[in-house]
Amino acid sequence: MTNTKSHAKQAIKKTAKKPDPFASLKSSIMLVSIAGTMAGWLVLLNQEKETAPMSTAIISTASSESGERAVTPTPIVDINQLRQVNAVAPVEAIRVVARTRSSQ
Amino acid sequence: MNTNTSNQTIPQLATIKLFAMGCHIQISLNTTRLSAQYSQITIDQQVTFLTSDIQQRLAYWEHIFSRFDDTSELMRLNSHTNQWSEVSSELFEVLQRAIHFVSRTQGLVTPTLLKDLWNAGYKYSFETLPKMSVPSLPVTGLSALANVQDTTSANHANQQIGRIQLRQLTHGQHQVYLPAGMALDLNGYVKGWCAMQLAEHISRVHDWHIPCLVDMGGDIAIGVPRDPIDKPVTWGVTVAKPYFSNSEHIQNDEDVAILKLSSGAVATSGQDYRRWWHDGRWQHHLIHPHDSRPVTSDVLTATVLATDTMTAEVYAKYCVLLGVKQAMAWLNEFDIAALLIDIDNKVMATSAMRPNLLAS
């Protein structure tokens, strides 16, 4: 038991005495990696904003009895329209300001 | 009435109220857009200038068209028949349009019935006419009007409309020739014409191009700027329940429907309000040209939507003169938005009216 403890103490002392020579390199690589990931996301987001609306048309096929395949495109949905679903523009209230009746 | 739901913005309004040409006038200006550009003091100043301008215009038009003022241009024309008379461009335009409507209403709505109105007792302004029956005489109501049409007399005014001549001279003068014995009454056209003129002036000629609603005693025009920056303003207009009064009760503030309008016009004509006691019976101002008497009709009031107020006014009057059955057939045939109320207070709307009905 005594020997084991003294070995452990020595190992700790050795570790404390010898700092990792690659520590700064490792942290630099870590920072570059994080920055790169963030930049990548920003580039992707930016591209997604600037590109024209993507056609989300799906071409479905159906087999007929004769074995021919009919191509039926489904309606194209504009992604911008889908984005507007939850953005309800304010509606102007209708105010009753007059009455129509026999000339008075 | 404001409709209150979420995501709604309340429009800002300025209101001008006047009394002119024998009717109550109310002009509503939508100042929502202006409020973002100008201070309230500046807006108030402009509204004051506009009010003064409108008053001057109304006074000018009243002096042209009044049939209760012998010095008005119309009455001077009526007293100079069988000759060419120079008239203003305003009188020329209204008369030209009135003549145009004669053929479109089978000769029923015509401007040549002034003498028949006089015979029915409507020679002075409505406010001065007797509204209560004389106790010693039999009490009659709308149903009694059937009796007054027993004596039918040929009215040649409809045939005579073709004898009115209008000409515009090369140097811009307008002239009218009235045949002998004819007298014109343009009251059934002028309010609508004035409402449209004011609405167009405020929304298109005035520097600020203000969206507006002009109400001339119940005949209404919507003013829409020619190049609207914002989306069109939608206005709410109620259709009043026919006027009813007796010695105990006067009803004048109930409605039967609410309309929404973004452009065009609406007008109501009826035998319910302008009624007076004359010659032992109740009279009203809607004269049937075939017998030269106030019409007996099962239409109490008619409300019509059209692109301009004069058309709405004429068609509403035409519906009263036709009666419920013929009027509904005619309205549906031409897909005209209208609402009729018969003498039993039953409300009938054409299918073309439904998109404009907010509530009924």
Image (cartoon, coloured by chain):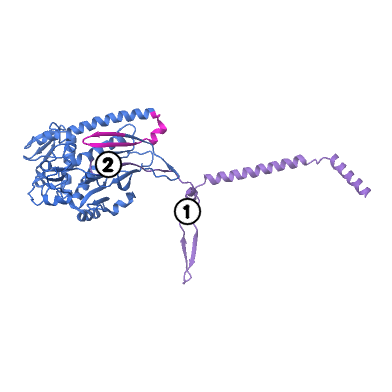
Question: Would you name the residue on which mark 1 appears?
Answer: A77
**Same chain for the residues under marks 1 and 2 in the image:** no
Q: In the image, B285: left or right of B37? A: left
Q: Is residue B106 magenta?
A: no
Which of pointers 1 and 2 indicates the residue nearer the eye?
2
Secondary structure beneath dot 1 equals: loop
Question: Would you name the residue on which mark 2 appears?
Answer: B220
Name the foreground residue: B78 vs B15.
B15
- Res. A9 visible in picture: yes
Residue depicted at x 13% and y 46%: B281
Q: Which chain is purple?
A: A
**Whole-Å distance between the Cαs marked 1 and 2?**
43 Å
- Please state which amino acid type lies under the numbered disc 1: Val
Q: In the image, B353: left or right of B38? A: left
The range drawn in magenta is B16-40
Q: Quadrant of residue B21?
A: top left
- Res. B349 visible in picture: no
- Please state which amino acid type lies under the numbered disc 2: Ile
Q: Quadrant of residue B250?
A: top left
Image location (x, y in percent) of residue B65 = 17, 35
Q: Colour of chain B?
A: blue
Specify the subunit that label 1 lies on: A
Residue depicted at x 72% and y 40%: A28
